[in-house]
Amino acid sequence: MQSINSPKMEYQKYFDYALKASRSLHELTKEKVNEVLTEIAGRLLESTAGILASNKLDLEKMPADDPKYDRLRLTEERLEAMAQEVRNVVALDNPLQEVISSSVLPNGLELSRVRVPLGVIGVIYEARPNVTLDVFSLCFKTGNVAVLKGGSDAEHSNKAIAGIIHTVLHAHGIDMNVAVLLPAEREATAALLQARGFVDVLIPRGSQSLIDYVREHSKVPVIETGAGIVHTYVDVSADLEKAKPIVFNAKTRRVSVCNALDCLIVHRERLRDLKEITLALSAESVVIYADEESYASLDGNYPAALLHHATSADFGTEFLDYKMSVKTVGGLPEALEHIAAYSSKHSEAIIAEDEVKILQFLNAVDAAAVYANASTAFTDGGQFGLGAEIGISTQKLHARGPMGLTALTSYKWIVKGKGQTR
């Protein structure tokens, strides 16, 4: 992995290194790839103290009440989980060279579509050092080079994790430029956005503003991931005993991630149950921004210091915090209309017992993951059986939802003949 010591230096050479490294990855056997990843997972845990010390330097620069603080923070448990995700990737079948389809033309030509790497994948991300390892493991497994551009918030953490990757690659005689960590300064981001012809695809992971910036300024093809404005609709037919744990889990399991609940939509006839649905949330000091009807229902039934009148800005907001808006509707059509107006097409859920309404919701909602009677916290590559994930795509071209190994591949046509001419 090459480092850049000054923002005034040219970045082009590092993209050259990445492109050259991508041409060597096809020489690695699947067994060697798994061996390297397994060793990286072990080295990560052996280096726990050093990584946490580096992470502490980053945490000291960020206020503890910043919504990104939880994403930035590493613990022994989180490092264990990161190592396990790498092992999960090792255990998965490698999709490279998989024959997607094959046929023989009337002229005798044998055609097959075979999975191949995308090539060089650039990922721009904010204060999430686990992304450094997740992205590399998925890219390496699928024969792709990872060009990593983390933010300054996680600079020390990213360098520590990348250093472990680097050490293991070097020990196995593998070109270390299969994992390029660009420096934290913005000039590196600008250079990456212009690296057409050297980087095959860019994947931004972070806030909506980051994703919008990358999409608007990149000359490299972009897969949009990350931002989640998540709704859960409690229908008139909902089972209250299901609704209470689902809402609580979706909101509080980990508030700083993109699958966390942002807006609870409640059928008007179930406002009588809103007190019970939100009771556990009050114990976690969740701030609620309620519309007029839901406010009237919660007034006196929810801590006054945590209850506020909603404004238009509270709908369509990814809070990434212990905050949630509540919208009252007269039925499923109105709920669908609200979701269509404010959704980021990430994850949406309905809690209902009416099978007709469930089917209508699942068919009508335009999102990467749509749930019935379950928490949106499950939108995750690991939970979906993909091992780690490189991100959650909210667009429709190439990949959608949690992106695992196959999402990092394309295909090429293999044509075999016996002297045919046209």
Image: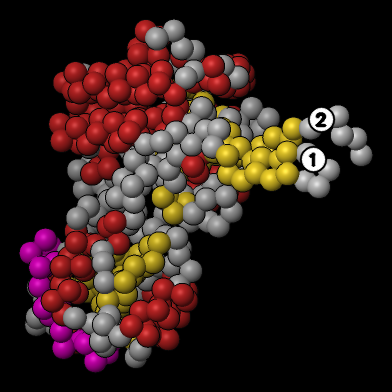
Q: What's under tag 1, amino acid-wise?
A: Gly
Q: Residue 10's spot in the image, x, y percent?
A: 60, 18
Q: Quadrant of residue 195?
A: top right
Residue under the image location 47 percent in, 51 percent down:
393
Q: Residue 418's spot in the image, x, y percent?
A: 81, 30
Q: Specify whether 312 is left or right of 421.
A: left
Q: 188 above or below 27?
A: below
In magenta, the rendered stretch is 266-285
Q: Could you tell me which secondary element the residue under label 1 belongs to?
A: loop
56 drawn magenta: no
Q: Nearer the viewer, residue 303 or 361?
A: 361
Q: Pointer 2: what residue?
A: 418
Between the C-alphas of marks 2 and 1, the distance is 8 Å
Q: Pointer 1: what residue?
A: 108
Residue under the image location 34 percent in, 27 percent down:
158
Is residue 244 among what the camera can see? yes
Specify the principal SS of the magenta part: helix
Q: Could you tell me which secondary element the residue under label 2 belongs to?
A: loop
Residue under the image location 39 percent in, 58 percent down:
228
Q: What's under tag 2, amino acid-wise?
A: Lys
Residue at the right extreme, as displayed: 422
Is residue 310 among what the camera can see? no
Task: Please identify the quadrant where the C terminus is shown.
Answer: top right
